[in-house]
Image (tube, helix red, strand yellow):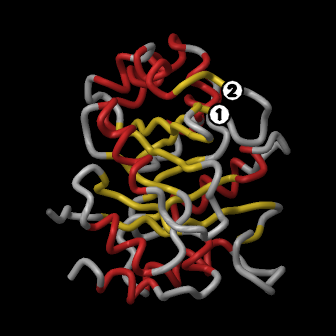
Amino acid sequence: MTSELTLLPAVDVAAGRAAQVPGDAGARPLDVARSLVQDGAGLLHLVDLDRAFGRGGDPGLMERLVEQLPVPVQLSGGIAGSEDLTWAAGTGAFRVVLASSALADPDLVEEAAQLLGGRLVVAVDVRDGEVVARGTSLRLGPVAEVVARHPVLRDGRARVLVADASRDGRRTGADVALFSSVAGLVGSAVTASGGVAALADLQALRDCPDVDEVVLGAALHEGAFTLGQALEVYR
């Protein structure tokens, strides 16, 4: 069985530049994003790495990117509090990703659902069967227990982005079983992130009905395949 799969090329921003473009310390995020759009991207995953790792972030740059890009943007990176949510909601981003760390506060997750409605995406970062918050030492417990604590994750009010924290950025292969297991817990197909190393991984995810979106990062930017080749897998 195959699924209709949407690809979300990632643009990770740190210190004002596109962090994952090898050998180009001056890569402008807007240029990288526009190049991806020219190559066929219909939806971009924009990440403020500085905000995600507690280095302050650059909200002004994120706002300008959301405004200037000609395709919808999924905004991510350290959005984990009420002020973060209010800011992110006001950017006009197509979607906003609530950080995995926010799952420690069920009231905040409910607040996000009320504020963002169908624009809400909740990140569930998983390592060794537990939900974690990357960039911190926070461990929230087994995935099934965390999902059980959050009706928002089970009742269709939010898309769930499953990030494989043990493989993210490492190009060691997509763990299709992990994505399927979380999809089973939340009762809907999920966005998969982490581990993609080659077109074969995209083919495996294409054939998994539990995944309907994939975030593309390291493999794409480091030249394992082009966006055109990735898109061809689904044509």
Residue 64 in which image quadrant: bottom right
Q: How far from the left and from the top, in percent, is residue 179? A: 40, 48
Q: Amino acid at mark 1?
A: Val
**Label disc, if present, on residue 79 of the rendered structure:** none
Instruction: Give the residue displayed 55% in from the left and 79% down from the top.
Output: 220
Q: Is residue 106 above or below residue 42?
A: above
Quick one: SS at disc 1? strand
> Which residue is label 1 attached to?
132
Q: Is residue 183 above or below residue 11?
A: above
- Name the quadrant of the C terminus: bottom left
**Label disc, if present, on residue 139 of the rendered structure:** 2
Q: Is residue 126 above or below residue 197?
A: above
Question: Dot 2, crowdedness within 10 Å: few (<14), some or many (≥20)?
Answer: some
Instruction: Give the residue displayed 71% in from the left and 41% down from the top.
Output: 134
Find out whether the residues at labels 1 and 2 contact each other: C-beta distance under 8 Å. Answer: yes
Q: Is residue 59 above or below residue 42?
A: above
